Amino acid sequence: MKKIIFVTGGARSGKSRFALENALLVPGKKAFVATAEATDAEMRLRIEKHKLDRGGSYDTFEEPFGISDLLKELDGSYRVVIIDCLTLWMANLIWRNANIDEEVVKFINTLRDVRGDTLISIVSNEVGMGIVPENETARKYRDLAGFLNQKVASVAHEVYLTVSGIPVKIKG
């Protein structure tokens, strides 16, 4: 039976660690869908650290744009799929001038359509709890990320907010 867990929280709040630890409780083949792109030296180091943290127990798929299509391809082949993270995915879509509404609808529909016996754990930053950004682009990004998080939370079976390394269950 499919189960969707949505994990949100601030930067460095323990979201990814919680998703990885939770996934270890499920036996079977595991996939990690990474949306980050190594656009500079610091990001390359972050990505390498995350790979080391995961160890060799995951098949890693680096997909900055087409996570819906990839999730369809993985359906039925993995017991666990972790998608990390939606806010980077949103930034990638904005950078690429993608049709955001279309991509979000496609992603939500894909989550609904997954048929495999799979735990889908989705990680995203909660970007709306800070100050209002000073420029239009940053405000648009914050708003789009917030709307995306709401939509994913609405289809998730469980939702967790991580605060200072502590996951707090807020749905399910």
Image: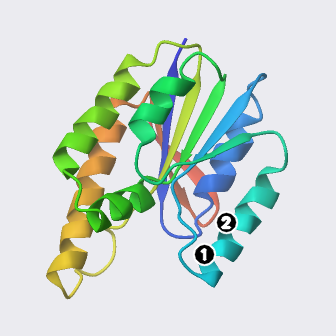
The residue depicted at 81 percent of the width and 59 percent of the height is 52
> Residue 59, image x and y in percent?
72, 39
- Establish if 98 lies above or below 25: below
Way the structure is coloured: rainbow
Q: Amino acid at mark 2?
A: Ile
When the figure is inspected, residue 107 is found, relative to residue 17, above or below; the finding is above
Q: Which residue is depicted at the point 58% across and 70% down?
A: 38
- On the image, the x and y values in percent for residue 143 come to 21, 63
Residue 22, quarter of the rendered image:
top right
Residue beneath the point at 33% across and 76% down: 130
Residue that extends furthest to the left in the rendered view of this protein:
136
Q: What kind of residue is marked 1?
A: Met
Residue at 49% x, 34% y: name it: 70
Look at the image and tell me in which quarter the C terminus lies: top left
Q: Which residue is mark 2?
A: 47
Q: Secondary structure at mark 1?
A: helix
Crowding at dot 2, Cα within 10 Å, few <14 / some 14-19 / many 20+, comes out as: some
Q: Residue 43 shows which numbered tag?
A: 1
Q: Which mark is residue 34?
A: none
Q: Kindly indicate whether the residue at mark 2 contacts the one at mark 1 (C-beta within 8 angstroms).
A: yes
Tell me the quadrant of the picture where the N terminus can be found: top right
- Residues packed near mark 1 inside 10 Å, few (<14), some (14 to 19) or many (20 plus): few
